[in-house]
Image (cartoon, grey):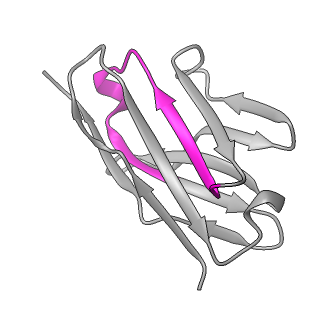
Amino acid sequence: QVQLVESGGGLVQPGGSLRLSCAASGFAFSMYAVSWYRQTPGKERELVAAITGGSTNYADSVKGRFTISRDNVKNTVYLQMNSLKPEDTAVYYCNARWRAVYWGQGTQVTVSS
């Protein structure tokens, strides 16, 4: 059974940090490109960060603040989020893509004082 399970979301004050995790199972995780997306009500899901091969790329809005990484032994992808802003508030989803496309169920991140 294919699963992507996100964790680590929550409420944080502006300027704070969170680390999201996404644990994968049921497929050859190391072969897949992995990404984090986010979505707010009424808006399309947007790409936040991705690892493809040995390269990473980030949305302009998060460059210098967010870092994506993966551990192919633990079958987990991470998103370290620093200097969080209210506009980072969203549901964050992990995504794995290669021969198929898989999505997690999402984790809520709320940045508010």
Above-or-below relation of 94 to 86: below
Residue sitting at the far front: 73
The outermost residue toward the left is 113
- Asked if residue 108 lies in the magenta stretch, the reply is no
| Residue sitting at the far bottom | 1
Which residue in the rendered view is the most extreme toward the right?
53
Q: Position of residue 47 (x, y in %)?
A: 60, 42
Asked if the magenta segment contains residue 82, the reply would be yes
Q: Please state if 55 lies on the left or on the right of 9 as rendered.
A: right
Percent coordinates x, y for residue 36 in the rendering:
57, 46
Going 60% across and 53% down the picture, which residue do you hit? 76
Is 1 drawn above or below residue 76 in the view shown?
below
**Quadrant of the snapshot with the N terminus:** bottom right
Front-lying residue, 59 or 79: 79
Q: How many marks?
A: 0
Quarter occupied by residue 78 = top right
The residue drawn where x is 62% and y is 34% is: 68
The magenta segment is 74-93
Image position of 106 (left or right of 79)? left
**Residue lying at 42% horizontally and 66% vertically, measured from the top left:** 105
Q: Residue at x 73, y 63 (%)?
A: 29
Q: On screen, 23 above or below 49? A: below
Image position, residue 89 (x, y; %): 31, 35
Which residue is at the front of the view, 29 or 93? Answer: 29
Residue 110 against residue 6 in the figure, above or below: above
Q: Tell me which corner region of the image, top left, top right, bottom left or bottom right, holds residue 81.
A: top left
Q: Whole-percent x and y of residue 94?
A: 55, 54
Q: Quadrant of the C terminus?
A: top left
> Which is nearer the eye, 53 or 87?
53
